Image: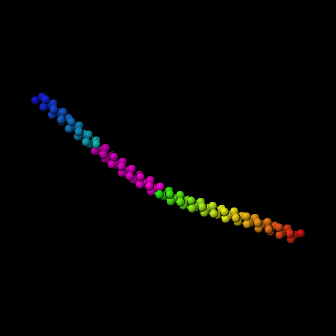
């Protein structure tokens, strides 16, 4: 009889502890689920931002190319202006003589 009581007590304690562990396990499962959802959302946001950044980098490259073309054209025009000034100065000097 004593042995049955001890076994019953041990079983009752084990079931009680198992019940507590079940609640903690469920809380942990819920936390894991929440963290997985947060990770999925963060991963999606990173992908969106990477796509936006790639688009911006393409736009930046195009703008830099356009700036380079404009600078070349500007330098060409400056050279043309300098040549015209020299011709004008030379013609003016020649006429004075």
* Left or right: residue 76 compared with residue 33: right
Residue located farthest toward the right when viewing the structure as drawn: 97
Q: Main secondary structure of the magenta part?
A: helix
Identify the residue shown where x is 50% and y is 57%. Answer: 54
- The quarter of the picture where the N terminus appears is top left
Give the mark count: 0
Q: Measured from the top left, where is residue 6 in percent x and y?
A: 15, 30
Question: Does 27 lie within the magenta span?
Answer: yes
Q: Is residue 40 above or below residue 24?
A: below
44 over 22 or under it: above or below? below
Residue found 86% across the figure and 71% down from its top: 95
Q: How is the image coloured?
A: rainbow
Residue 62 at x, y percent in the picture: 57, 62
Image point (33%, 46%), residue name: 31
Q: Magenta part of the protein: which range? A: 26-50
**Residue 57: image location, x then y, percent:** 53, 58
Relative horizontal placement of residue 72, taking residue 12 as reference (left or right): right
- As displayed, is residue 78 above or below residue 40? below
Of 25 and 61, which appears nearest the observer?
61
Q: Quadrant of the C terminus?
A: bottom right
Q: Position of residue 64 (x, y in %)?
A: 59, 60
Residue at the outermost bottom position: 95
Instruction: Name the residue furthest left.
Output: 1
Magenta region includes residue 36: yes
């Amino acid at each position: 009889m004593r042995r049955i009581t001890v076994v019953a007590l041990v079983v009752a304690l084990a079931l009680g502890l198992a019940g507590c562990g079940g609640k903690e396990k469920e809380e942990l499962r819920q936390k894991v689920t929440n963290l997985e959802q947060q990770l999925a959302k963060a991963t999606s946001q990173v992908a969106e931002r990477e796509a936006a950044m790639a688009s911006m980098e393409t736009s930046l490259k195009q703008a830099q190319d356009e700036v380079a073309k404009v600078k070349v054209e500007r330098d060409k025009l400056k050279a043309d202006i300098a040549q015209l000034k020299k011709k004008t100065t030379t013609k003016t000097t020649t006429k004075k003589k």
